[in-house]
Amino acid sequence: MSIVRTALPLVLLTSVLTGCAGLQKTDWPKCAAVGGVGGAALGAIESSSWAGWGALLGGGLAAGYCWAHGDGDEDGDGVPDSRDKCPGTPRGVQVDADGCPPPAPAVVEEVVVQKEEVIVIRDVHFEFDSARLTASDKQRLNTIATRLKQEAPSARLSVSGHTDSVGSDSYNQKLSERRAHSVTDYLVEEGVPRSSFISVIGAGETQPVADNATAEGRAMNRRTEIKIQR
């Protein structure tokens, strides 16, 4: 009987401490309460006068053991540190079973394709009173050809030539047509598919974008436009 009375307290105390080990540090009051009840019971086995001391001793041991060996929750998200895969989560943030915030919903950006665009070429000057391209003209058009080859063959291209108001209307009309075709032919030579061009026209002096009364305005009006339709 003495062996049982000696072994039983140890078994009960071990059970209490083992149970506390699975709790969090913040659960030490629960451990203290359980330990106190267990300690009182253990003390009562020995003598009724030992019940109070057993409760005090058992509660203190259980609380201390729980605090020392219990699992913590450093970031306070409700997930024990031993299985918290995202430590340091800000307080108030909702977390999953692993202590991690749920992934942000994927944002799908809509790609807006500009259906129509106009390339305005003003620094192609041609040879004087001619539709022949100069060397600097070709250099400028090489850059545009590279761009248009990337657009082809899905894009539809419309080329229009424009002049200033110097000269007769009929002369400027024909000159604008020749220059529009000259630009188109060079772009085709540089690799832009001819099938991409749906129209090549001359508008003469009918569509000015600036005042023909000034040299600056006339320079702006002497231009070739390439409209890209996607």
Image (cartoon, rainbow, N blue to C red):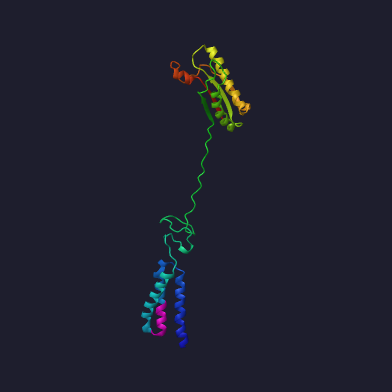
Is residue 45 covered in magenta? yes
Q: Is residue 34 above or below residue 210?
A: below
Near-viewer residue (64 or 40): 64
Q: Is residue 64 above or below residue 49?
A: above
Q: Position of residue 163 (x, y in %)?
A: 51, 17
Q: Is residue 80 visible?
A: no
Q: Position of residue 110 (x, y in %)?
A: 52, 40
Residue range (magenta): 38-47
Q: Position of residue 63 (x, y in %)?
A: 40, 72
Residue furthest to the bottom in view is 1
Q: Is residue 173 above or below residue 40?
A: above
Q: Report whether 88 appears left or right of 154.
A: left
Is residue 111 covered in magenta? no
Magenta stretch, main secondary structure, is helix
Image quadrant where one finds the C terminus:
top right
Near-viewer residue (122 or 227): 122
Q: Position of residue 5 (x, y in %)?
A: 45, 85
**For the image shown, how many numbered marks are present on the structure?**
0
Near-viewer residue (143 or 177): 143
Q: Quadrant of residue 72?
A: bottom left
Residue furthest to the top in view is 168
Q: Is residue 62 visible?
A: yes
